[in-house]
Amino acid sequence: MNRTLSAFAVCGLLLTALCGCRNNIDISDNTAFTRDLFAMDTFMSVRAYGKNASAALNSSEKLISSLEKELSVTLPESDISRINSSGEPVRVSGNTAAIIDAAVRYGSLTDGALDITLYPVLRAWGFTTGEYRIPDSHELSELLEKVDYRQIQSEDSTVSVPENVMIDLGALAKGYTSDAVAQIMREKGVSSGLINLGGNVQTVGTKPDGSLWRVAVRNPYSPDTDMCVVEIADKAVITSGTYERYFTGEDGKNYWHILDPSTGCPADNGVVSATIIGESGIMCDALSTALFVAGTEKAVSYWQSGNEDFDMILVTNDRRMICTDGISDAFSSSCSMPVEVIHRA
Ligand code: ADP
Ligand code: MG
């Protein structure tokens, strides 16, 4: 009898404990929730901590999928596909208009190093399909006649481009997306979050214990290893590198997916990877591509001009790291490349 009673008592306690857990889930600020997804041709992982995390992740996932539907260059109903095929002014979403306007602005700030009208040239190289080939110079110069971001007309969320001009937002869409996810997390009350869109990282607040996030940056000369770690809070760390997408031609040379709009060929101006660190994801993404294309000297003078608030780590084709002074204290190298810290005049 006693035994039966105590068995009931144990069961009762267990049930109470289980019900207690179900009805009043104890989520501390340190409890991590992670959502892995594939969108925008990229593996993404979004992590948030604390009691608001789960709802924030649901909203983030919805947001990413709706942004993809607006921004994709391959989905036929997207804003971008409609702009590329219509020949008429196209009414677009506020998101699409904001990215296009930012892209045009960064195009002009970087003297055309960022040019979202490169799409026909990217297609000719096969970077959009994976059917890689090396276009000849005649084909490239014909295609380049249509490349110029200044031909984009954008006003009041209505965008038009001349016939045969096509745009693609691959250079900055992920940065815009990570900004939008970070904003949703903050709105939902998340104070600690980590957004990783295919290696492009954006952070919300600090780690739950109040310490800085440690973000590793890959070594472009050995992409399976890290070259350094940067410690940040509330910032994005976004890298463009030769190793991210490339093919080896029959001539044995590597051809990568970031093109120089002045030649139509993979940009080869001294930078093999450009990492930009700053508060705005879209700025970091736009500048990672643009300063990679611009090359070492122009990238350094762009940063020194102080137009915008960001830090950068460049890796040069003679195996040096150039690091701006704002990040040098929060940076630890894990490779053998020499590091040069640069300052504003
Ligand atoms: P990733 O998307 O691999 O992280 P980037 O942010 O540098 O790297 O974006 C590269 C993409 O941007 C390319 O795949 C292509 O779609 C597009 N692109 C390539 N060169 C340029 C350029 N000079 N200006 C604008 N877009 C570019
Ligand atoms: Mg970019």
Image (spheres, rainbow, N blue to C red):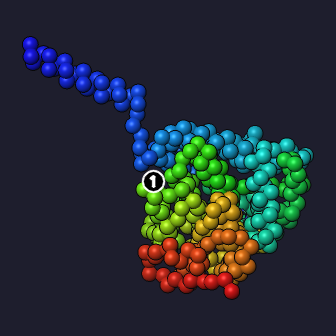
The answer to whether residue 56 is visible is: yes
Which x, y percent locates residue 158? Answer: 87, 47
Residue at 46% across, 58% down: 210
Q: Position of residue 91 (x, y in %)?
A: 85, 43
Q: Local crowd at mark 1 within 10 Å, few (<14), some, or many (≥20)?
A: some
Residue corresponding to mark 1: 208
Name above or below for residue 57 compared with residue 251.
Answer: above
Residue in the image at 60% along x and 83% along y: 342
Horizontally, residue 343 falls left or right of residue 330, namely right
88, 323: nearer the viewer: 323
Q: Secondary structure at mark 1?
A: loop
Q: Quadrant of the C terminus?
A: bottom right
Q: How many marks?
A: 1
Q: Residue 321 appears at what percent x and percent y?
A: 54, 80
* Image position of 292 with respect to 116: above or below: below
Q: Nearer the viewer, residue 41 or 265?
A: 41
